Image (cartoon, rainbow, N blue to C red):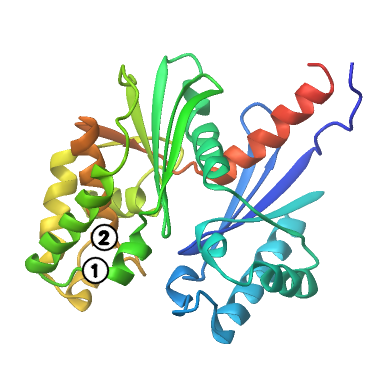
Amino acid sequence: MRTSSPAPARAAVIAIGSNSTRLLVANLEEGLRQPLRGRVETRLFLALDERQGFDNLALRGLVEGVQALKAQALAAGASRIDLVATAAVRDSRDEAGLRDLLRAGTGLELKVLSGAQEARYAFLGAAHPYLQAGRLGVIDIGGGSTELALGQGQALEDSCSLQLGASRLYASQPINSPQDLKAAQALVARQLAAQPPWPAPPPARWLLVGGTGAALLYLSRGSFDVDPHLDHPVSQAQAWRALHQLAALDARERTRLPGMMPGREHILPTGLVILVALMDRLGIQEVLVTHRNNCDGYLYGILLEAHENTGR
């Protein structure tokens, strides 16, 4: 029997995403007790230049954001703080330089997740309340990539990471008119057509992770007054209605809509193009929008590893 150290009582993960950098602090128990969440908008993917480097302003904002989230984690009692990054940093030509910059500025060591790891953590985080509910599918639409995962309980059966994200699509085909919408749909359709078929049979339910899902939920409700501890159904028809509504408006007009999530006026349409294309391709009529994400999954991963190492 292995006798590695048990999981820390209270741990934190800071995840550098393509649109935002997020924090989750929680007691490492079966339900991640007493969670604290934080978020700063860093928009890292859109700061990549043509040579796949980040400008100095974006880097300064990232370091300051991570510093602020680290301070929140320490104030919340975290005895372990991990720093991870996803697609924007994977795409960067200077991952080593960014790692050095963050180490010097925050004292944290950066771990860059692969697409497969992103999918696993998205699945673990989203699926945890449904461990006895049969097979589940998870869609995680990020800024630089989209992860699909399929599994049952805590066991991931299959996953893939697509080079499709709300910010990535916006960078190549922003949506400012119905004509732009058609062009973006054609681009996504071509990319999805190159993917292999998804394994059958389909899962009993699909969960939607990420800012696109949350923003769609708020916009559909016309309000931010949504219980973040519950998962909320959103239909393909609702996603289509929101997409066509947004495509007919400019960015300033979108910000005036009730329930429009600040900072999403440019990239919500592109995220929705990806969502409706996936729902159509996979035959999904309804998804459950969850506020859990790969941060939850990462902390569950620490807990599972500790259980395995101690023979539990």
| Type of the residue with mark 2 | Thr
| Type of the residue with mark 1 | Gln
In this orientation, does residue 246 appear? Answer: yes
Depth check, mark 2 against mark 1: the one in front is: 1
**Residue at horizontal 35 percent and vertical 23 percent from the top:** 199
- Of the image marks 2 and 1, the number of the one nearer the N terminus: 1
The residue indicated by pointer 1 is 173
Tell me if label 2 and label 1 are in contact, CB under 8 Å: yes
Residue 215 vs 151, above or below: the answer is below
Quadrant of the drawing holding the N terminus: top right
Residue 256 vs 9, above or below: the answer is below
Q: Nearer the viewer, residue 215 or 196?
A: 196
Q: Quadrant of residue 288?
A: top left
**Residue at horizontal 45 percent and vertical 64 percent from the top:** 19
- The residue lying furthest to the bottom in this view is 56
Question: Relative to residue 100, is residue 289 drawn left or right?
Answer: left
Measure how far apart labels 2 and 1 are at the Cα level. 8 Å
Q: Which of 215 and 259 is in front in this view?
A: 215
Question: Relative to residue 306, is residue 139 drawn left or right?
Answer: left
On the image, the x and y values in percent for residue 151 come to 46, 23
Helix, strand or loop for disc 1: loop
In this orientation, does residue 77 appear? Answer: no
On the image, the x and y values in percent for residue 261 come to 33, 62
The residue indicated by pointer 2 is 270
Q: Quadrant of residue 16?
A: bottom right
